[in-house]
Image: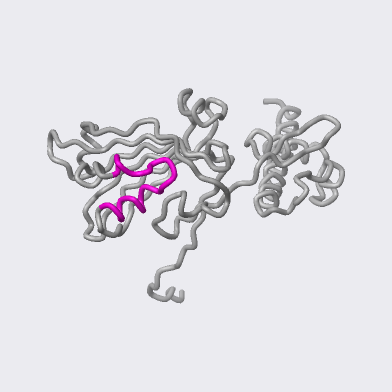
Amino acid sequence: MSSNDSGARGPTRLRADRARVIADRLRQKVVGGAFASGVLPDEQVLAGEFEASRNAVREALRLLSAEGLVVRRPGLGTRVVARKFEHSLDRLAGLAETLTEQGTITNEVRTARLELPPPEVAARLGLVEGERALYLERLRTLAGQPLSLDLSYIVADIGIALLDEDLQSRDVFALIEETSGTSLGTAEVTVHAVNADVATASTLEIEPDAAVFQIDRLTRLADSRPVDLELIYLRGDRISLNSVLHRAAGPAASTP
């Protein structure tokens, strides 16, 4: 590698890093509702605010545009496409319970039937060989826009009662508690960032390979019995996941 190549790569990397930092700061402002009008300041104003070049600001805006957070129109500037909704991971609650104040939430029930679950699902739900479960596939919308695709397996003795319930407008967690007369207890949650396959992207009305949150959630009743195993695909451009973490008490740091 020549010294010229090395020299060119250094500034390019620094500019890319600077653009990422600007994008991170702008994202926080957008999500926090800093631009009430929905319009971001022009590049020159942002360059002055962040003490950066217009090229770095332009690249930061391109990153946010690729995320689907803003849209750029020649002559019209940069506008916020849609604000993100916050879903807390601090408590066991369904999306409908968490986002009920943000707009009308509905579910398109794509599938609702008793079937034999895959072996790995049956094992996690504690089912014996040949035991069926209720399989639910729902497309969730918020204010008329696709938000998530939910794939759920619910143990049959509790899930079968849900077939007679309003699965389009009611939250499954609430229905489980109402129909079974038993409270939910805990859930084990894992969150992955994945690229949407073609079918999922089409359902959620996003670009193929767009990043989505994939939430794996095994919910238990108050007596610790597994009851509901969900795989949820959430649009990353429409929702953010948040939590308050508490540091566990531990031994004081030793003094060297």
Residue 198, image x, y percentages: 48, 23
Q: Left or right: 206 with respect to 233?
A: right
Seen as rendered, the residue at the extreme top is 198
Q: x, y (%) of residue 171?
A: 40, 48
The question of residue 164 being in magenta is answered with yes
Nearest the viewer among 4 and 197 is 197
Q: Note whether 88 is above or below 201 in the view shown.
A: below
Residue at screen point 44% across, 39% down: 214
Q: Nearer the viewer, residue 101 or 130?
A: 101
Type of colouring = one colour
Q: In the visual, does 185 lie left or right of 192? A: left
Quadrant holding the N terminus: top right
Instruction: Verify whether residue 102 appears in magenta.
Output: no
**Residue 50, image x, y percentages:** 79, 50
The reply, left or right, for residue 139 in relation to residue 220 is right
Query: Quick check: 35 above or below 2?
Result: below
Residue 107 placement: quadrant: top left
User: Which residue sits at x=77%, y=38%?
Assistant: 78
Q: Nearer the viewer, residue 25 or 90?
A: 90
In the displayed structure, 249 sits above or below 169; it is: below
Residue range highlighted in magenta? 162-179
| Residue in the foreground of this view, choosing between 24 and 128 | 128
Question: What is the magenta segment's predominant secondary structure?
Answer: helix
Residue 62 lies in quadrant = top right
**Spot occupied by residue 40 in the image (x, y as percentages of width and height):** 78, 45
Q: Can you tell which quarter of the image residue 53 is in?
A: top right
